[in-house]
Image (cartoon, helix red, strand yellow):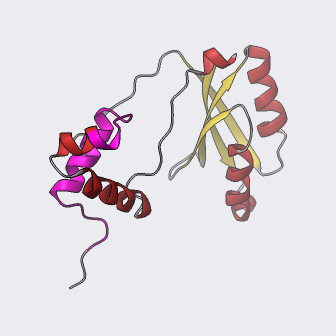
């Protein structure tokens, strides 16, 4: 029976846990934390990236420091006859500077779009110009985000 590519051995799990705790660990510190040689750690890390276990490395920047202090989650429902446009619509949204994340959903809403705006007028313009006026959009509902607390997937 072939090994399931979606399973991780103990060493891989320890590498992932260490990076989730401190994503900026240099390879030698990561290897020490996990208890393996630095060369082995680097090979394992590359494999985790290649397999898609680790989807990327990034810096999370507070949008307020970039001049976009207002965040909102916008629920979007597409028209029933616009289902063929799902991929194009989500890619178009993801390319807009206001958009932080696009979530394609099951349920009443088709998408939740997480945006950051300069001010209320900027948020309104985004909703009106890019969502409400789009021919494939049937409905939008905007919710302001007062605070965001990152969760931690249990180990």
Any part of residue 78 in sight: yes
Q: Quadrant of the C terminus?
A: top left
Above or below, 100 against 149 in this view is below
- Residue 5 lies in the magenta-colored region: yes
Figure label count? 0
> Would you identify the image quadrant in which residue 84 lies?
bottom right
Q: Which residues are magenta?
A: 4-28
Any part of residue 153 in sight: no
Q: Quadrant of the N terminus?
A: bottom left
Above or below, 126 against 80 in this view is above
- Residue 11 lies in the magenta-colored region: yes
State the residue at coordinates (75%, 61%): 81
- Horizontal and vertical percent position of residue 40: 25, 58
> Would you identify the image quadrant in which residue 134 lies?
top right
- Horizontal and vertical percent position of residue 103: 55, 45
Task: Name the foreground residue: 125 vs 35.
Answer: 35
State the residue at coordinates (69%, 36%): 140
State the residue at coordinates (37%, 36%): 23
Q: Is residue 121 left or right of residue 111?
A: right
State the residue at coordinates (62%, 15%): 65
- Horizontal and vertical percent position of residue 107: 51, 50
Task: Name the foreground residue: 36 vs 105.
Answer: 36
Q: Is residue 135 left or right of residue 74?
A: right
- Horizontal and vertical percent position of residue 144: 59, 20
Q: Is residue 57 left or right of residue 85?
A: left
């Amino acid at each position: 029976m072939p090994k399931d590519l979606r399973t991780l051995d103990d060493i891989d799990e320890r590498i992932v846990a260490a990076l989730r705790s401190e994503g900026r660990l240099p390879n030698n510190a990561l290897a020490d934390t996990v208890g393996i040689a630095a060369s082995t750690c680097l090979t394992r890390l590359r494999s985790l990236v290649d397999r898609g276990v680790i989807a990327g490395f990034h810096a999370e920047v507070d949008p307020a420091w970039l001049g976009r202090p207002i965040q909102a989650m916008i629920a979007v429902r597409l028209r029933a006859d616009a289902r063929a446009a799902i991929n194009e619509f989500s890619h178009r949204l993801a390319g807009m500077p206001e958009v932080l994340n696009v979530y394609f959903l099951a349920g009443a809403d088709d998408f939740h779009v997480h945006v950051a705006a300069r001010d209320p007028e900027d948020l309104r313009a985004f909703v009106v110009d890019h969502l409400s006026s789009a021919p494939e959009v049937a409905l939008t509902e905007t919710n302001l985000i007062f605070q965001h607390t990152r969760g931690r997937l249990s180990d």
